[in-house]
Amino acid sequence: MKHLFCSCLLILIALHVHAQNDPGCYTDYRSKGLEFMGKKNFGEAISQFVAGLVSCKELPANNDLARLVQEAKETWIRELQASSERERKAYLEAVTARDAAEQAQSKEKSAREEAVKNAQEAYKRGVKAESLRLALLADMVRVKGKVSDAVLLAWMSLQMSGEALPPFGVRAFNEAVRDSFSINIFNSPSPVVFMRYLPSHQRLLVENADHNFFVLGTGNQPTVTQLPENIARVVPGIKHDSLLVWEGGAKSIRVLGPDGATITTLTGHAEGIRDAVFMQGDALILSGSRDNTARIWDLKGTQTAVLEGHTAAVQEVREFPASGGVLTRSSDGTVNVWVMNQSIHHKLGGENALVRSLSTDDASAQIAVLFADGAAGLFDAEGKLIKDFGTGIKAVHCSGSSLVAVRAEKMVQLFSASGALVASCPHRTKVLGTGFQNGHLITWDEDHDVRIWNTNGAQLHEFIGHRETVISAVLSPDGKHLLSTSKDGTAKLWDLEGNIMLEWSIGTNDPAPAIFSPDGQQILVASNGGKSVMLTVLPMQIYKSVKSEPVLQSPGFSKATAVYNIQFVEVLKQRQD
């Protein structure tokens, strides 16, 4: 019995075995599974059968692996039930022995104590077996579409397990809740590629593969507003849900309300817009154009400044509060620092260095720059080089906490705002992405693994389970869960021990990143081939709300007790009391 939980984990791990081309793949997995079945090692047997289904590219048309998985689960449940009944019988026998000893007023105190101990241990083992059996049953009946039964069984499984909730039971409850309470708030004609909450946290900006944009209301009555067609970019406000939009090649910018209505139009650039942002808390707008200029506007559309000095298109603009001005990046390879309408001309880097990207934060006046040749450096607002990060750099960005992350092939290094090396985070394979949250560094690499590091370079957590490239990984606002999305067509919710708490099948290998709501109480996933936006309440929030509720009085409890032959019902009453 003590290996049951480990066996459950092996079932999950087996789902991620790499595909095999060996013609004997099917036969090997089937025979190994049957061998484990014969030894009553059902968890390993299921692992082998599922591995055969997932990993073997050539399966016989009449293969029986799915049937064997079902047979192993059913046999396992019968074994667990038999074990539960045996342990209960052992408990009752031990109680009888204890009573007999007490009635006989035996002087063998040690014998009585041993009988009590045996009774307690047998009872604990029986309750644990029954809790696991209920979780397995919940998973099986959920797959069969009996979602209400699945929720009730998973709820009872967690209640029976006590305060230390087992990951397998939590996952069974979470999946039952997902299938019961998730709601579809939007259907798109083509796959969703991007989702982002607007500043009010009441609306969602969505972009699909047809390059159409929508604003979704996420309240009790979801609303859908499609923005005008042929928009090249949509940039949300800083504090309000206003939007900056412009068409490809357009010389003007429109300011829209969240309902899609035009508030004002900014006209003045001589050539197409390349970038625009709100600044100073949405009081002003900064734009960059192919006419080699950047311009500053008020919300009435009045042009307040023209920033001239670049010799090619201005590709990127951003506010730079630490210097009291703005930054512009141009196709001429330079970055300019401006204080309103006065340009401080600084070329960051060598004579022939072309800036590919830049990053800043609101806390310091440093600019992290990546050059086209793979070199990178940290500069101050006057263009002075603070730190040369060397070459072979793939990405560099400021964290917002006076740290700069520099990503090379298999290494991420953290530097202070003064350029001092703070930590090094080595990886086994090529690093594909990084992020900062809650004072932690998050990375993912070609191993399809996600890692969390502290700012001293110590690896705190590792999440192994995706089968293809991870495209995003974010922590929940409370820092207790990680949400990842992968090109294997899944989004996964993890606890910080690396256990998968919940999984969504997105139905496409090019999914939009799943996101948490700003309060962390909900998760948004693009499912159904990426064309539907599904909102799922964080399941454990539901469990917390019903944890103290009387499960014995819930609808269907009596029927479920009889249908599923539930043992140790008195434990549920004790937990309730």
Image (cartoon, helix red, strand yellow):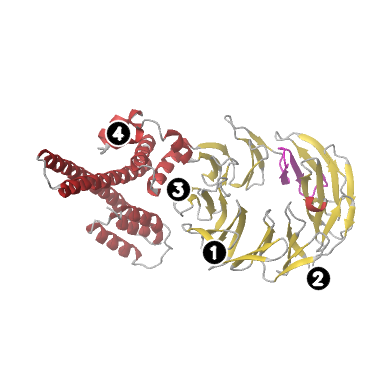
Circles 2 and 1: CB atoms closer than 8 Å: no
Which stretch is magenta? 228-252
Q: Quadrant of the C terminus?
A: top left
* The residue positioned farthest toward the left in the image shown: 104
Magenta stretch holds residue 249 = yes
SS category of the residue bearing label 4: helix
Q: Is residue 418 above or below residue 500?
A: below
Residue named by callout 1: 446
Category of crowding for the residue at label 1, using alpha-carbon neighbours closer than 10 angstroms: few (below 14), some (14–19), many (at least 20): some
Residue named by callout 4: 560
Residue 312: percent from left, percent from top? 84, 60
Q: Nearer the viewer, mark 2 or mark 1?
A: 2
**Image quarter for residue 41?**
bottom left
Circles 1 and 4: CB atoms closer than 8 Å: no
SS category of the residue bearing label 2: loop
* The residue positioned farthest toward the front in the image shown: 107
Left or right of 193 on screen, residue 555: left
Residue named by callout 2: 350
Residue named by callout 3: 501
Q: Which mark is residue 365?
A: none
First of labels 3, 2 by sequence position: 2
Task: Please name the amino acid that badge 4 sits on.
Answer: Ala
Category of crowding for the residue at label 2, using alpha-carbon neighbours closer than 10 angstroms: few (below 14), some (14–19), many (at least 20): few
Task: Please name the amino acid that badge 1 sits on.
Answer: Glu
Residue 322: percent from left, percent from top? 78, 52
Task: Please name the amino acid that badge 2 sits on.
Answer: Gly
Category of crowding for the residue at label 3, using alpha-carbon neighbours closer than 10 angstroms: few (below 14), some (14–19), many (at least 20): many
Q: Is residue 97 above or below residue 13?
A: above
Q: CA distance from mark 3 to mark 2?
A: 50 Å
